[in-house]
Amino acid sequence: MLLASFNEGVHRSMAGNHEAAVQSFDQVLAVDPRHFPALTAKSFALKQLGRTEEALKGFQRAIELDPTAADPLREAALCQLELGEPEAAALLMERAVQLNPTPGYREAAAIEVYALGNALLTQGRRPDKARYRLARQVFELALELSPAYVEAAKALADVWEHLGDPTQREHYTQLATRLRPASS
């Protein structure tokens, strides 16, 4: 029964029916509250539904169950960014990339972090100084994860322009220029 419910949840989530997926994963967790795959999959489905605080709690529980798993740390970090907590996110992301130090994992995390920074500046109302400051921290984390990430450096130059610091803007503009591949 557990495997069938878990598989049903996975199929529902992959089909984009995250609400139904959460119900399937809840069936598994009712029988086995320590079922790590169901807990992480449910948390991911909650995140897809925009229920970020609930997702974060689930990822935190998954981290308690298996502190050596990198993905719940990474997902919890992304939740923290969505909730406007870049310092907490940076600590979680640092632990995640320590557990999975492969370059591809760092690059993928940097891309996700960068996308969140862009969403922060492009969704909803016109960005104010507070949103630009938060975006700065998000883009800095993306650049820290992937030091050759040209788009993150460009985004930081833009953010510093909006924050009124021409010295920092010029620094990141120059960095983005230096990071360009030689073939371009």
Image (tube, rainbow, N blue to C red):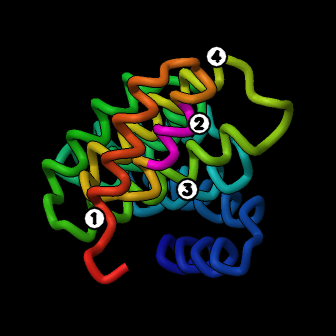
- Residues packed near mark 4 inside 10 Å, few (<14), some (14 to 19) or many (20 plus): few
Q: Nearer the viewer, mark 4 or mark 1?
A: 4
Relative to 50, 71 lies left or right: left
For the point 64% across and 16% down, which residue is it?
A: 130
C-alpha gap between disc 4 and disc 1 = 30 Å
The answer to whether residue 39 shows anywhere in this view is: no
User: Going by the picture, which residue comes out furthest to the right?
Assistant: 125
- Residues packed near mark 2 inside 10 Å, few (<14), some (14 to 19) or many (20 plus): many
Residue 130's label in the rendered image is: 4
- Residues packed near mark 1 inside 10 Å, few (<14), some (14 to 19) or many (20 plus): some
C-alpha gap between disc 2 and disc 3 = 14 Å
The answer to whether residue 116 shows anywhere in this view is: yes
Front residue of this view, candidates 153 and 171: 171
Residue underneath mark 3: 44
Relative to 73, 26 lies left or right: right
Residue 82's label in the rendered image is: 2
Magenta-drawn segment: 154-159
For the point 56% across and 33% down, which residue is it?
A: 159
In terms of sequence position, does the residue under pointer 4 or pointer 1 come before the other? 1
Q: Nearer the viewer, mark 4 or mark 2?
A: 4
C-alpha gap between disc 4 and disc 2 = 14 Å
Q: Nearer the viewer, mark 4 or mark 3?
A: 4
The kind of residue tagged 2 is Glu
Residue 45's label in the rendered image is: none
C-alpha gap between disc 2 and disc 1 = 20 Å
Residue 16 percent coordinates (x, y): 73, 73
For the point 26% across and 70% down, which residue is it?
A: 104
Relative to 28, 131 lies left or right: right
